[in-house]
Amino acid sequence: MKDLMGNAIWDYFHNGNTEDLQTETSISELDELPVDYLFRDFQGMNKIEQKALKLAQGKILDIGAGAGSHSLYLQNERKLDVTALDISPKSIEVCQLRGIQKTVAQNMLEFSGETFDTILLLMNGTGIFQSLNVIDVYLQKLFSLLNKNGQILIDSTDILYMFDTDEDGGVLIPANGYYGELDYIVHYKNESEDPIKWLYLDFNTLQNAAENNGFKIEKVLQEEDSYLAKLIKI
């Protein structure tokens, strides 16, 4: 991993670099991602993020923390005990420089030793699951990181709307595999990361997977094709 996302976050924090990240998937063209968006405050977040941050409680693990905006709000505004975790070393360095007291630069599957009351997975949090083939591995790991009655607050988008329809209104989706399993590529300063697997989940599919792995699940908020779900360890 070249850590292009982390490099962009680092450059913006230190130099005010305004060059955007670019992202694309196997079903979409290049899209601009302004780096300053990753540094937004609570007012700049969408309703799903705001709702999740209001519901967070107890000891919190923020997975995929990025530049740390969610963790900073929880730590500084809500005075909660929060750990920011990201696989990107550069991103975690910036989290530390922004004042986040507890940080971990590690793959979540390798993280252990603590348990939490709330786990946050935001900005298409289901993406980290990669594919339906390994979703149970991730959900079991998350289960092990939660205290009894602990909660996971996770968002995703049902991307069915991105596919064409036929004359009868049927959706033309790939015959092989689940339609939300995409290849995701990040570009920055004329460099490109290797494609990674990224998973967008409709709520019913997430519900089935969550219940199969010992969670109680409810949809907390729906915003157009995106939603926030709460998984409870029972």
Image (spheres, rainbow, N blue to C red):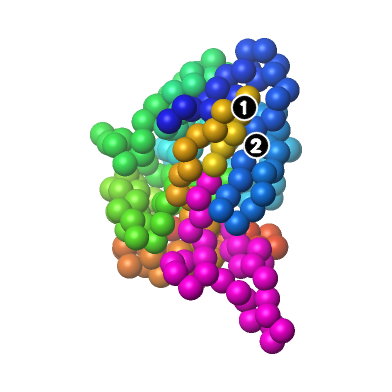
Task: Name the residue located 65 percent from the left edge and 37 percent from the top edge.
Answer: 22
The mark total stands at 2
Report the Cα–Cα distance between label 1 and label 2: 10 Å
Q: Main secondary structure of the magenta part?
A: loop
Q: Position of residue 142 (x, y in %)?
A: 35, 49
Please rate how many residues cluster around mark 2, counting C-alpha atoms within 10 Å: few if below 14, some from 14 to 19, many from 20: many
Q: Which residue is under mark 2?
A: 22
Please rate how many residues cluster around mark 1, counting C-alpha atoms within 10 Å: few if below 14, some from 14 to 19, many from 20: few
Quadrant (top left, top right, bottom left, bottom right) of the N terminus = top left
Q: Nearer the viewer, residue 209 or 192?
A: 192
Q: Which residue is under mark 1?
A: 190
Any magenta on residue 40? Answer: no
- Relative horizontal placement of residue 48, taking residue 205 as reference (left or right): right
Q: Amino acid at mark 2?
A: Gln
Q: Amino acid at mark 1?
A: Asn
Q: Position of residue 27 (x, y in %)?
A: 60, 56
Residue 234 seen in the figure: no
Task: Name the residue located 30 percent from the left edge and 53 percent from the top edge.
Answer: 137
Q: Position of residue 61 (x, y in %)?
A: 43, 38
Any magenta on residue 177? Answer: yes
Q: Position of residue 103 (x, y in %)?
A: 43, 25
Quadrant (top left, top right, bottom left, bottom right) of the C terminus = bottom left
Say what secondary structure mark 2 lies in: strand
- Residue found farthest to the front: 190
Q: Which residues are magenta?
A: 156-184
- Relative horizontal placement of residue 127, taking residue 20 as reference (left or right): left
Task: Name the residue located 41 percent from the left edge and 70 percent from the top edge.
Answer: 208
- Residue found farthest to the top: 15
